[in-house]
Image (cartoon, rainbow, N blue to C red):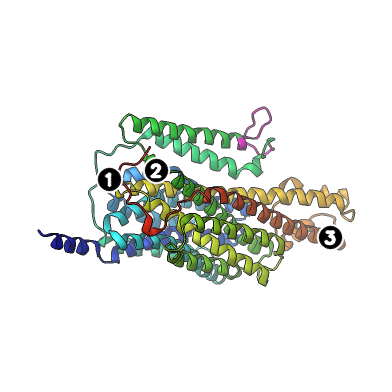
Amino acid sequence: MTSTETRGATTAEERRSWVPMASLFLAQVLMSFNVAALPVSLGGMVEDFGVPPTVVGSTIVVYGLTVAALVMTGAKLGQRVGWVLMFRVMVATFAASALLMILSPSVGWAIAGQALAGASAAIIVPSLVALIAENYRGAQQATAVGSLGSARAISGVTAFFVGGALGTLVGWRPVFGVVLALAVAVLVLSTRLRSDGGDREVRIDLVASVLIGLAVVLLTLGFNNLNAWGPLVATDDAPFSVAGVSPAPLLVVTGVVLGQTFFWWTRRRAASGRTPLVDLRVLARPSERAAVYAMFVVVALEAALNFTVPLYIQIVQGRTPFDTALAMMPFNLTVFVTATLVVRFYGRFSPKVIGVFGFTLTTVALAWLSLVVTNNWETLPTVLGLLVFGVGQGALVTLVFNVLVTAVPKHLAGDVGSIRGTTQNLASAVGTALVGALLVTILSVNVGRAVVEHPELPPGLVAQVDLDAVNFVSNDELREVLAGTDADPAQVEAAVALNEEARLNALRLGLLVLAGVSATAVLPASRLPRYRPGEIPDPSPEREG
């Protein structure tokens, strides 16, 4: 065959139908819609199950925890059994999790539903990257990879709008009917995916699986219970204590140690010529490690904001899920548009420049919101802050993923997918858990100080209210609590005003802390690659260790 014929054959092979990509695109939408639907459903689930918002927030944490704990093992399982087969099985399991959410009689069943969804996503996440690499080449592959970022962004817009409307008009359960419908659509379209039989010689490193799984679980449980069990000294709610020390920080430290042990074991296994659970060559360069750090921070910030706004609007203000959707629409639309269009700037600016600029925007936006936010989210200064944050978020979430994908050869695509899945979902779980603990802690301090500073609330009245269990409640709920005390109308109104002030101050300080976290990410962003697309070297199978 001549060289011209070869090039023609290659071109014909590369230019494949976009129908298979539609299945992968909708699979990303499926997972992202499920996660975005949880904050929108917060108020309805709290009312339906009769539990505090932080307990309902555990559904978000459990989903992210399960994905992060199992995604590396899931990637190897997909390589062994076959990506297409595992993809279809896990999408079907995701559909089952949606049914569990729709029919759940208690918050425990809802948490179990999200655990099942997370276990399914643990294989779907790496399969997206692997199947794109299998089904597309060249420019089509680059477009397909970029579409995953926009799919994630559009899911947020759709989930907040559709979920808000359904949650207001019908209830929170039909929102997960949309998740079920998406899963069915993905299964139908997946028939066009290129099939593979897997590689039975792939071995799953069970030691590494246990190490990374335990590390993720302990880290998430530790962060998620810093408030309930105590950040340092154990509270009465702590299941145990060690010399009076809370188990929460001990779990975090143990999780960090196990994580470091996982990396040590993985390097040792690779050095001996055996297949590791994840190929660490995908993180061989400082720029690639910087991309992972940046990805963790930006996803954690997004999760924190997506938890904070619905918490305040639905729980504190007592407004509808549709109000939440409208309040978050500027942010989600901006993320979607920016994630889609930012690739146009790759030819003019390096990843380093875009990364630093993106984190600068998110830092400025969060600091601005901490100054201007009021009890009304629809004010122009607040909307402006959300728009600026959305620009930075959208640019970063697409950028860091593309840095990882373009830096490695095709056969490491599954490892990139597992790194991405672990990072994003651990960040989402930690971001949600930390912001919940942070806001409740700040609120408790504010309420305790305000009680001392307000003599119109006598000690006898304060003693009738459990200040050790302070949480975010609406004014109506607070009035119901005070109705069971001997407070007179003037004291009730004083307590409501105190609670309003304490809540708003907690929100502002929490946003300021998030701005500080965003600022710290400028350093790893400055270590992102300095090349432009035309200067990107072809990824070599032989990476420097």
Give the x, y percent position of residue 203.
30, 37
Residue at position x 26%, y 61% in the image: 191
Q: CA–CA distance between discs 2 and 1?
A: 15 Å
Q: Amino acid at mark 3?
A: Ala
Q: Which mark is residue 494?
A: 3
Residue 195, quarter of picture: bottom left
Q: Residues within 10 Å of mark 2 (few under 14, many from 20)?
A: many
In the image, is 395 to the left or to the right of 127? right
Is any part of residue 131 visible from this angle?
A: yes
Q: Which mark is residue 274?
A: none
Number of numbered discs: 3
Q: Amino acid at mark 1?
A: Val
Residue bearing mark 1? 81
Is any part of residue 466 visible from this angle?
A: no
Q: Is residue 237 magenta?
A: yes
Reading the chain from its start, which is encountered first: label 3 or label 2? 2
Give the x, y percent position of residue 204.
33, 37
Residue at position x 51%, y 65% in the image: 335
Residue bearing mark 2? 72
Q: Which region of the structure is painted magenta?
A: 235-249
Give the x, y percent position of residue 217.
50, 40
Give the x, y percent position of residue 113.
47, 52
In the image, is 207 to the left or to the right of 58? left
Q: Amino acid at mark 2?
A: Met
Reading the chain from its start, which is encountered first: label 3 or label 1? 1
Q: Residues within 10 Å of mark 3 (few under 14, many from 20)?
A: some
